[in-house]
Amino acid sequence: MTHDSNIEDRIRQRAHEIWLQEGQPSGRENEHWEQAKGEIESTSTDPDPDLTESLGGADDRTETVPPQQASRGGTAPR
């Protein structure tokens, strides 16, 4: 089993859990997938820079501005 398919299996399982927790609503598959994907990405011990691309989603992560810069209205360096 490849790394990508293992992550995809974990996302699929988590999305299913979310669906069950929300009472099995129809038409929310994409929302559940994206939520599960975000959770799996944030808890991954082996970050994969190609994870988002390989799973077909957009990278919607944002940079965090350190508190000292935020208080001065600055932005995080890129």
Image: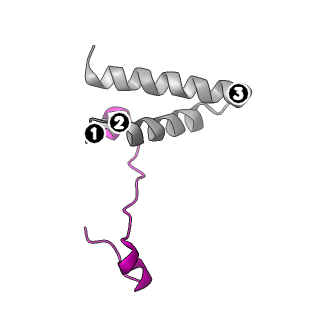
Q: Position of residue 23 (x, y in %)?
A: 74, 27
Number of callouts: 3
* Alpha carbon distance from label 3 to label 1: 31 Å
Look at the numbered disc 2 and give the secondary structure of its residue.
loop
Q: Residue at x 40, y 42 (%)?
A: 42
Q: Position of residue 62 (x, y in %)?
A: 40, 59
Q: Position of residue 29 (x, y in %)?
A: 59, 30
Q: Residue at x 42, y 20 (%)?
A: 9
Look at the numbered disc 3 and give the secondary structure of its residue.
loop
**Region rendered in magenta:** 52-78
Q: Which residue is mark 1?
A: 47
Are there few (<14), some (14-19), or many (20+) residues within 10 Å of tag 2?
few
Residue 27 shown left or right of residue 16 in the figure:
right
Residue type pointed to by label 1: Pro
Residue 41 shown left or right of residue 28 in the figure:
left
Residue type pointed to by label 2: Ser
Q: Which residue is mark 3?
A: 26
Indicate the quadrant where residue 20 lies.
top right
* Alpha carbon distance from label 1 to label 2: 6 Å
Whether the magenta-drawn stretch holds residue 35 is answered as: no
Where is 74 relative to 63, above or below? below
* Alpha carbon distance from label 3 to label 2: 28 Å
Numbered badge on residue 44: 2
